[in-house]
């Protein structure tokens, strides 16, 4: 029954991921608490179950895509005892390192193969089947997971043992949060100095200041036409999700005794954005907040 996948969490990410598994020929039994998510999944060919237990029944592989570590752990605690030894369970959610390690330990207690495999690429990547997966767990579990991961994504990296995938995700997104603020500050300063945004872009994108936040996701309208700045900062990647990941990075840093002063500052800046009611805007709208531009008024 290796071709039956139990999928729990059919939200913005999980919904399209489950549909891509169906398109690749897997039989997918899905469950979500929210009726709207269940009906959307049904339209995509997912066989929707009434409970998580029903969704995992007879599945060779189980995938969870849930909002947080505590929720993921509670679902794992519910379904793990129901799975035959040797079943592969993969968590693709972004969660805290502690919950992730606890989940791996639980899976080992039940004789299951487990993988943490968080993703980057957002809803667009989930829909297009082009996600990047960063995985933690045994080499054997990673090898077994590849056919399902390949149905949902394009790049898969085995990062190391249990928890290494979440560690990679948290570290990557801490870089992203900090670099978006750095690029936004530079454009704000350029504005004040009378330097045109296009000139700063032309120089920095070919100099040592170049990074993804500048060249692919530029926070000011103009230089990169596809960036959310040109679309009223509609996400994209919402500031609230960036704040979630930055908070995870700070919890991980505290637990591991790592100094992350810029990660701490970036977290405070995105907390300010959320307090101002801007958590639903794309995270690159941090440019507007930092420069004092009223939402939606940044111009090229
Ligand atoms: P979402 O809120 O749209 O989806 C989560 C789904 O889980 C919801 O439909 C919810 O009803 C369901 N759920 C919650 N508790 C449940 C339970 N006990 N049993 C069954 N279903 C339950 O969130 P999302 O955007 O799909 O994100 C999912 C995960 O992916 C999060 O950990 C997020 O951080 C991560 N992620 C999101 C993005 C993105 O751009 N949205 C990008 C990368 C990673």
Image (spheres, rainbow, N blue to C red):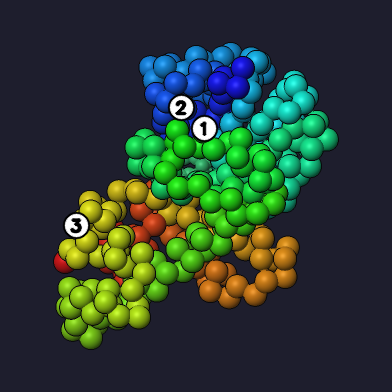
Name the residue carrying label 1.
Answer: 148
Which dot, 1 or 3, sits closer to the camera?
1
Residue displayed at 42% across by 44% down: 154
**Few, some or many C-alpha atoms within 10 Å of disc 2 (few <14, some 14-19, many ≥20)?**
many
Residue 15 x, y percent position in the rendering: 45, 29
Residue 171, quarter of the rendered image: bottom right
**Horizontal placement of 135 versus 86: left or right?**
left
Q: Nearer the viewer, residue 96 or 110?
A: 110
Marked residue nearer the N-terminal end (1 or 3): 1
Residue displayed at 19% across by 65% down: 223
Instruction: Assign a secondary structure to mark 2.
Output: helix
Give how far apart the Cα atoms at labels 1 and 3 are. 34 Å
Q: Is there CB contact under 8 Å for labels 2 and 1?
A: yes
The correct choice, above or below, for 75 with respect to 180 in the image is above
Instruction: Assign a secondary structure to mark 1.
Output: helix
Residue 21, numbered circle: 2
- Residue 164 visible in image: yes
**Horizontal placement of 6 versus 125: left or right?**
right
Report the quarter where the N terminus lies.
top right
Name the residue carrying label 3.
Answer: 225
Residue 192 x, y percent position in the rendering: 24, 82
Residue 66 x, y percent position in the rendering: 57, 36
The correct choice, above or below, for 37 with respect to 119 in the image is above
């Amino acid at each position: 029954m290796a071709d039956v996948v139990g999928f729990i969490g059919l939200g913005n990410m999980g919904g399209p991921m489950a549909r891509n598994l169906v398109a690749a020929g897997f039989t997918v039994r899905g469950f979500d608490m929210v009726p709207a998510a269940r009906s959307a999944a049904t339209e995509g060919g997912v066989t929707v179950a009434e409970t998580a237990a029903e969704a995992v029944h007879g599945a060779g592989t189980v995938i969870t895509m849930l909002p947080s570590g505590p929720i993921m752990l509670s679902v794992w605690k519910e379904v793990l005892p129901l799975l035959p030894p040797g079943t592969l369970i993969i968590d693709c959610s972004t969660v805290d390192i502690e919950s992730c390690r606890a989940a791996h330990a639980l899976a080992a207690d039940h004789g299951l193969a487990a993988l943490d495999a968080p993703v980057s690429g957002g809803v667009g990547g989930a829909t297009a089947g082009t996600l990047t997966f960063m995985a933690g767990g045994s080499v054997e579990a990673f090898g077994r997971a590849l056919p399902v991961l390949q149905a949902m994504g394009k790049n898969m990296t085995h990062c190391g043992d249990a928890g290494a995938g979440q560690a990679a995700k948290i570290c990557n997104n801490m870089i992203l949060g900090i670099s978006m603020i750095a690029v936004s500050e530079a454009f704000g300063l350029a504005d004040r100095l009378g330097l045109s945004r296009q000139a700063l872009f032309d120089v920095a994108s070919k100099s040592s200041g170049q990074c993804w936040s500048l060249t692919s996701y530029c926070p000011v309208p103009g230089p990169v036409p596809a960036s959310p700045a040109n679309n009223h900062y509609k996400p994209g990647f919402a500031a609230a999700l960036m704040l979630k990941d930055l908070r995870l990075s700070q919890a991980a840093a505290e637990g591991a005794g790592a100094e992350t002063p810029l990660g701490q500052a970036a977290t405070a800046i995105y907390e300010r954005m959320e307090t101002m009611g801007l958590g639903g805007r794309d995270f690159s709208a941090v440019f507007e907040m930092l420069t004092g531009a009223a939402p939606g008024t940044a111009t090229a």
